[in-house]
Amino acid sequence: MRAFVLRARSAPTDSQLLLASVGQEAHTEILAHTLMNTIFVAQSHRNDVVVYLVLESTNDFSRTICFDTRNICHIGGFHEQALLAKIAKALDISRGMTKEQTRIVDQGISVSTISFEKLVQELAVDYQLFMMDKKGTSIREQEFVGNPCFLLTDHIPMPKKSFNTLKRLGAQKISLGPKMLFASQCVVLIHNELDINQ
């Protein structure tokens, strides 16, 4: 399995605010673009991918929405509007949840009130963690053993304290090249590299 975590620090956990933030300062369209490029291939979707969207602009708890492609049957389309609608539905279902609860949204989709740090701690048990860094090891030189998990952010960089936590969990820095890319572009390059070499 391949896992991808998108930490969206500016994404609201209120569904209406989320939809209103498309094209605005919070750039919530990044969630849909990354989800689209992570899950879908021509005329189908990948069946070996888990995507976690961690939305952090909240008055209570972060919301982590999980898309497990092994179990997803119908997502409503692969365009931005359909994917954002599915994310908004997950946020609506998460109303009233207390800390570290999980609810099912649809088949293969769930929402949890779990923080990025707690999620990554749990993933570190079963996955080899990688974070994007222009100065990291080139992905073409990196050896992937077992299940890789790639940690990405929206337009707000990862806080320095998070880097220290990730290092303690064994996360390795990898590079996709000299330019800073959108998360949605990163996942395409990562998939391509793994498709060719695995």
Image (cartoon, helix red, strand yellow):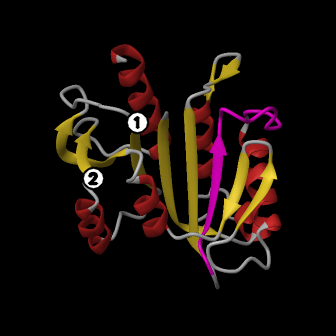
- Residue 54 appears in which quarter of the rendering? bottom right
Q: Which mark is residue 100?
A: none
In the rendered image, which quarter contains the C terminus? Answer: top left
Measured along the vertical axis of the image, is residue 81 above or below residue 10? above
Q: Which residue is mark 1?
A: 147
Predominant secondary structure, magenta span:
loop
Choose the circle earlier in sequence order: 2 or 1. Answer: 1
- Which residue corresponds to the image point at 65% horizontal and 17% vertical from the top-left? 42
Q: Which residues are magenta?
A: 61-78
Say whether residue 55 is left or right of residue 173.
right
* In-front residue for pair 160/33: 160
* In-front residue for pair 136/114: 114
Q: Is residue 64 magenta?
A: yes
User: Which amino acid lies under the numbered mark 1 shown in the image of this protein?
Assistant: Asn
Q: Which residue is mark 2?
A: 171
Q: CA distance from mark 2 to mark 1?
A: 13 Å
